[in-house]
Image (cartoon, grey):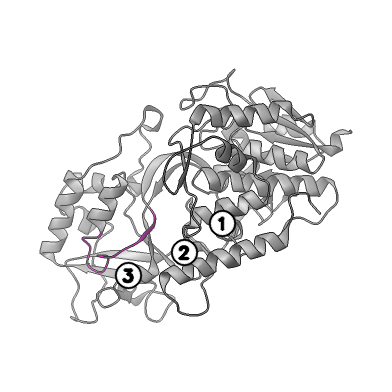
Amino acid sequence: MSEKETVTIIGGGLAGTEAAHQAAALGLRVVLYEMRPETPSPAHNSGDLAELVCSNSLKSDSLDNASGILKEEMRRLGSLIIEAADNTRVPAGKALAVDRLKFSDYITDKIEKNPLIELVREEIKSIKSLRRELDGPLIISSGPLTSPSLSQGIAELTDSEHLYFYDAISPIIDAESIDYDIVFRASRYDNGQNSEGDYLNCPLNKEEYYRLTDELEKSEKIETRVFEKGIYFESCLPVEVIVERGRDTLRFGPARPVGIIDPRTGRSPFAVVQLRAENSLFTMYNMVGFQTKLKYPEQRRVFRMIPGLESAEFLRYGSVHRNTYIHAPSLLRPSLQMKDKDGIFFAGQIVGVEGYSESAAMGIVAGINAARSVLNMSLLTVPPASAIGSLLRYITDESVKHFQPMNINFGLFPPIPKKVPKAVKKKLIAERALSEISAMYEPTGK
């Protein structure tokens, strides 16, 4: 085969190996670069491909969970990652958990034995130099711990203002779980685009505010790993760090009530927690300024103390950690191609998704589309009502003003047009998603 029939991939993690598998399944030659073990990362322990760094769980495998729907879509698209997980799973209830070593061994063996895939153990330090050698498409799937030299290359490729090296993210709440008898809509000094106000506001009186700050201060936090030290910026401090600087610091910062009038009292609250719409469907709301390192059970317990959020369902928990990712809405099309460079695709966590399955799903899309671009086939258009399509819509939606990485959740799916019980709604979302995926594409490419 000529070089024009080759797909080149940087990164042998979940997304990179998935992209290689998908491109090879369409008959393309693939060159897959992985820097380990020659160049180790601060988080990995081996040179195996697709090594799971954190948990050995890929989360729920049940169709009443958004993560389970995503996995089933991936199975129907011939996912290597889900195939490996299914073959190395360990008992974990409804979750798809794996034997970590067998999982990586399975994927490494499949990649190394595929006659169309050449695995090169070498760190790519210059994208510009690599591109000069290529005529075929390039997929960048270098992951959350992209090396400094490759990060510099990506910064040059994307414009450095579109590249981020950490996550400081706030929890996201299901809109249906908010108590609208307490929470009210308003913008500071009525300076909003919406006539009723751009934000939802949770008012706190003096007693409620100090009870919240006391719990934030004494709650259990996730320990910071060595390679994540020093990532806080003053404009993006974890909420518990703000509270440690003084009990009133939070209400003079993210929880300041200035310019907010509670329509039911005609007065400004003692403090206010604001919620900002996370998508154009208004199904998800972000807790503004509440990025946090609280453990997940603590986030549920403490944040449900906020008036109006007593029954809050968390679609994404807050976190602060090391993560390299691009501002996908500015840079990528739904095909995962760069908007101004047709031959370059991105995949994995670097596009702004969170989670093992989510990262691998982006590898499926990038691998298929890179191969199709070589074969002069139309690129894959993923239905927006599917889990994969919902993720793609979110990460490429230019109307998302405060882009942060996202995991799959029911808030991303288009709403069911009729009002039905929650259990029925989840079932209908799953049936619609899987029907659309099955109709869209067969793993053989036919």
- The label on residue 289 is none
Label count reads 3
Q: Which residue is mark 2?
A: 411
Q: Amino acid at mark 1?
A: Leu
Is residue 253 left or right of 160 when viewed as pictured? left
Residue 93 vs residue 48: left or right?
left
Dot 1 and dot 3 residues touching (CB under 8 Å): no
Q: Residues within 10 Å of mark 2 (few under 14, many from 20)?
A: many
Q: Position of residue 92 (x, y in %)?
A: 42, 42
Q: Is residue 246 above or below residue 393?
A: above
Q: Which residues are magenta?
A: 304-316
Q: Could you tell which of marks 1 and 3 lies nearer the N-terminus?
A: 3
Circle 3 SS class: loop
Q: Quadrant of residue 420?
A: bottom left
- CA gap between label 1 and label 2 equals 10 Å
| Residue drawn at 19 percent across, 70 percent down | 269
Residue type at mark 3? Ile
> Majority secondary structure of the magenta segment?
loop
- Pointer 1 residue: 391
Label 1: element kind? helix
**Residue 367 visible in the shown view:** yes
In which quadrant is the N terminus drawn? Answer: top right
Residues 257 and 389: in front is 389
- Type of the residue with mark 2: Gly
| Disc marking residue 178 | 3
In magenta stretch: residue 389: no
Point out the image quarter for the C terminus.
bottom right
